[in-house]
Image: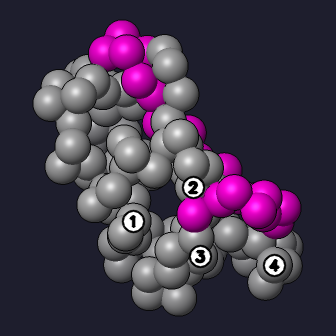
Amino acid sequence: MIYISDIAKERVLKTWKEEQLSDAHFVRVAVTSGGCSGLSYNMKFDNEQLPSDEVFEDKGIKLVVDPKSILYLLGTTLDFSEGLEGKGFYFNNPNAARTCSCGESFSL
């Protein structure tokens, strides 16, 4: 399962409204090679689901993950921060053994 925090949910809904996205949109999360720790997170709003995608729903938000990324993301929570460290979405991943200082990449 992949989760979304309450604050991230509110930010997703606000963004969808601002960008006038339809109810057919969802949050696509993925892991790719790269970043200073070896693996990087990717997130985007999408409306094209592939047959091989894993689909989760938490707090009424649909989260979609490709089959390769799911192994890295199980148990992860998508969160949002407006703090001094920066503003934006971030991933709280219990599988990550090490993360970089910017929080955008990790290793197992």
Q: Residue 25 at x, y = what percent? A: 76, 71
Which of the marked residues, 1 or 3, is nearer the chain's N terminus? 1
Distance from label 4 to label 1 (Cα)? Answer: 19 Å
Disc 3 or disc 2, which is closer to the eye?
A: 2
Tag 2: residue type?
Val
Which of the marked residues, 2 or 1, is nearer the chain's N terminus? 1
- Whether residue 42 sits left or right of residue 6 in the image: it is right
Tag 1: residue type?
Ile
Q: Which residue is mark 2?
A: 65
Q: Residue 15 at x, y = what percent? A: 66, 67
Q: Is residue 81 visible?
A: no
Q: Which residue is mark 3?
A: 62
Distance from label 2 to label 1 (Cα)? Answer: 9 Å
Q: Residue 81 at x, y = what percent? A: 34, 54
| As drawn, 96 above or below 57 | above
In the image, what residue occupies the spot 39% across and 65% down? 2
Q: Secondary structure at mark 3?
A: strand
Tag 3: residue type?
Lys
Labelled pair 1, 3 in contact (Cβ < 8 Å): no
Q: Which residue is mark 4?
A: 24
| Most distant residue in the top direction | 36
Quadrant of res 80: bottom left
Distance from label 3 to label 4 (Cα)? Answer: 10 Å
Q: Which residues are magenta?
A: 35-54
Labelled pair 2, 1 in contact (Cβ < 8 Å): yes
Q: Which residue is mark 1?
A: 2
Instruction: Please name whichever residue, 65 or 23, is drawn nearer the observer in this view of the structure.
Output: 65
| As drawn, 14 above or below 92 | below
